[in-house]
Image (cartoon, helix red, strand yellow):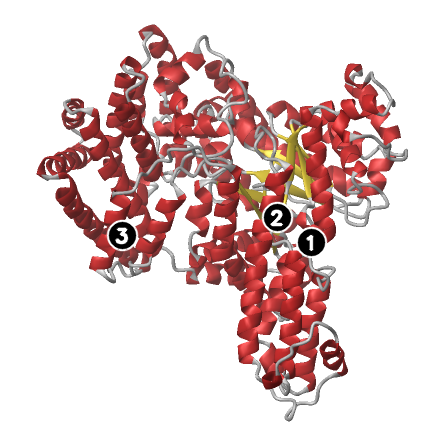
Amino acid sequence: MENVAAAQSLNTLVSDLGDLLGEIIREQEGDRTFSLVETLRRRSISHYRSGLVELRAELRNLIGENDAEEIGKVLRAFTLFLHLANIAQGVVNGDSSAARGDLGKALARLDPKTRENLSVGIVLTAHPTEIRRQSVIDIEGRIAGLMGRDGTIRDRRALKREVLTVWLTELARREKLRVQNEIDNGVSVASRSILPAMMAVQTEVERFFGGDPALPKPMFSLGTWIGGDRDGNPFVTREVFDYAVAQQQSALFGYYQRELDLLARELPVSDRFVQLSPALQELLSREPKLADPYREGEPFRRAIHHIRTRLEETETGGPQAYPGAGDFTADLETLTEALETAQAAVIAEGRLAELRATVAMVGFHFFTIDLRQNSRIHERTVAEILTATGITDGYAEMDEAARAAFLSDLLLKPVPEFDPAALSEEAQRELGIFATVAAARSRLGAGLVRYSIVSNTESVADILEISWLLRLHGCFGEDVAEPILPVPLFETIEDLRVSVPIMQALYAVPAYAAAMKATRAEIMLGYSDSNKDGGIVTARWEVWKAEAALTELFEGFGQGVAFFHGRGGSVGRGGGATRDAILAQPRGKLARGFRLTEQGEVISKRYETTDQAIMRFCELGQGLAEAEAAGEFARPATHFVNVMEAMSEAAFQRYRSLTTADRFLTYFREATVIDHIASLNMGSRPVSRSTLDKLSDLRAIPWVFSWAQTRHNLPGWFGFGTAIRQAGGSMAQLEEMYRSWTTFRSLVDSVVMVLAKADIEIAGAYADLVEDKALKASIFGLIREEWQITMEMAEAITGRRPPETDPDFLLRKAYLDPLHFGQIDLLARIRKEPQNADLQDALKISINGIASGLQSTG
């Protein structure tokens, strides 16, 4: 009944918002534009109700009759409506009470002794999939605040002001985002909703297990790549890293200072009524002291002044700065003990306990900033240093085995002295980052930077190179208490397949094994490039196999291992239901950590409000608890594994038959918006690594984004149907695998999720843009054939028609048709008039609107 009521509330609210938007369009643009928008809306809705293709054709003709300026207005109307519908959906479905209840049920299944095995970290990335401007996000946040969960509008006049404001605001960015903008945006959402939500859920977990909320055993951690990810982004420099640290510190210290101010107001406790503990007396005797006679008899306020002043000095680097977060914590504990000594422990359970818990969770650093760079850059930097120091000038000519042997010996030798200024600009930039990181860690604690991720890890030498570079800066080695951990990133199909022998050989290097013996290794598994490389079935399966084999390897070492999952928002980049994804991971006997990336539009979708963020943390905690409770019983049957292996091979061959087909990239460029994505200025990174002459040059985000825009959506399903039909065996077997094996069920459900938003007829309309009709017939014919097989197989396994599995999307899909056919019309016109600014602007609006309607980009 609750779901029915929520659906009715949502429908009412969306209808009211549509009326309000229509009112604004008529007032701002006139009756003609309003009438055209209404006509297109009615034609599209009628098409979906009746199935009459003639109505869709009429809609296309109506769009084609208008000039670029008018099309732009129409597309803006549908785009903004979809924005408003998404906001309404977030508000109506934004109650976190159900998620909290589900988390409690999952925790109840656990043995309390195993709770410390639960560890999950979210890592914000600046990957460019958030298509909305920050200004628009801010306005839409205010719009959400004017809506009630019961579907009511709290203040229609105020709502109209905000909707009118966003109508008069440019939806697309004119200029490319800088990394500093991305840092500001990440810190903003973390301060506003992520940190409060994480602390709220952590507190609930502590209370569930009877622990002290002020002394949490952290289940969650916060990380970010923004400001530390240099892979393919030349704009991330030591200055940018410093800026990221400064912004994080400013936000966190500002929070601490505000909390201390509020705490001081709450604690006007008099020394006439409490006996001061020795520790508090000692604290009050230290500088800095409060020279205020009005506070002479209020010891707690004087102590808080001392703490706050030292905190300010820590932020500015003053002489009274705290050496580390532990010293700040010790002073807060002194306040707690003093209240307990005065028989006032209940007072310490409020704001003071919350502050202590926050410091325990995020210290002085807030986020852990991950470093990331391509292995090729590390290789060139190491080669330059070795030449400059006279150690060897032949490193670049060594093969991988020789490099690994050479570096194994080098890690045992003293660090050489050299002048970085004598090196190339690239090497200076890399070493500058490491030097800056080392200095920041010494000031704010080792938790500020704990991982250095190596993209394109293909050999043992790739990890030994970063190990040596870190050792040069005192951040890695057997004598380093809290080292920065080298993290290999295995991201292509071939990389995943060789991950075990690489890690096995790596831990056979004495210096490396000694440096890592006191810590848990972390390994990153990439979904995006593996999917682009081999298709969804093979990518998911190779990730699962690699994780299972690596878990077994490290258990053989007697060590646990943490896995970092590079998941995007879309299924084609590892997205989908996170709880199911956690349950789908292979099981191990030893405790394992789990981190995952949160990227682009996913950040605002999951963390825009505190309630949304609470729901997300509850989902993560629930998945971890259920997976831990399932334990060894969740291991799949050997027969299922064999079937999955055969299906993976069939899917791989089918997928490669498409992506290696003659002139496939020509089809991709002419039937999608790939050549126009860079103009959206979504992020600071380039769209491709070089010229787009081969598929490997293209980044995974624009690859998935382009297929989604055209409703092909093929990264999320292509090859699945053939895999099931050719190698899945009987339907009874497949149904049993779906019922009893979470890994297979997660794959199937992810494919179904994508199919629900794919539309082969709209995809065909984009395919008509391909100039060579024989090429179009060849490639699109293969896509349509596989789509039909996949639809049939998905329905046979699940018993549901994929288009009917996403009721929320069914409400939006009619509003996407005008955007799609408007976009198709614009693409055709732009090819004739590539310099027409009105056409380009209208195209940007269409891309924004389609992304909003699909609630996904890359």
Quadrant containing the C terminus is top left
The numbered mark, 2 or 1, whose residue comes first in the sequence reads 2
Q: Name the foreground residue: 160 vs 646.
A: 160
Does residue 504 appear in the picture of this structure? no
The numbered mark, 2 or 3, whose residue comes first in the sequence reads 3
Residue 566, horizontal then vertical, whole percent: 57, 37
Real-space CA distance between mark 2 and mark 3, rounded to the nearest whole angstrom: 34 Å
Real-space CA distance between mark 2 and mark 1, rounded to the nearest whole angstrom: 9 Å
Q: Reply above or below: 269 against 384.
A: below
What crowding class fits label 2: few (fewer than 14 Cα within 10 Å), some (14-19), or many (20 or more)? many
Circle 2 residue: 245
Mark 3 lies on a secondary structure that is: helix
Query: Along the horizontal axis of the image, is 718 left or right of 242?
Result: left
Circle 3 residue: 162
Q: Name the foreground residue: 388 vs 571.
A: 388
Mark 2 lies on a secondary structure that is: helix
What crowding class fits label 3: few (fewer than 14 Cα within 10 Å), some (14-19), or many (20 or more)? some
Residue 609, horizontal then vertical, whole percent: 42, 55
Real-space CA distance between mark 1 and mark 3, rounded to the nearest whole angstrom: 41 Å
Circle 1 residue: 444
Disc 2 marks which amino acid? Val
Disc 1 marks which amino acid? Leu
Disc 3 marks which amino acid? Glu
Residue drawn at the location 79% of the way across and 26% of the way down:
385
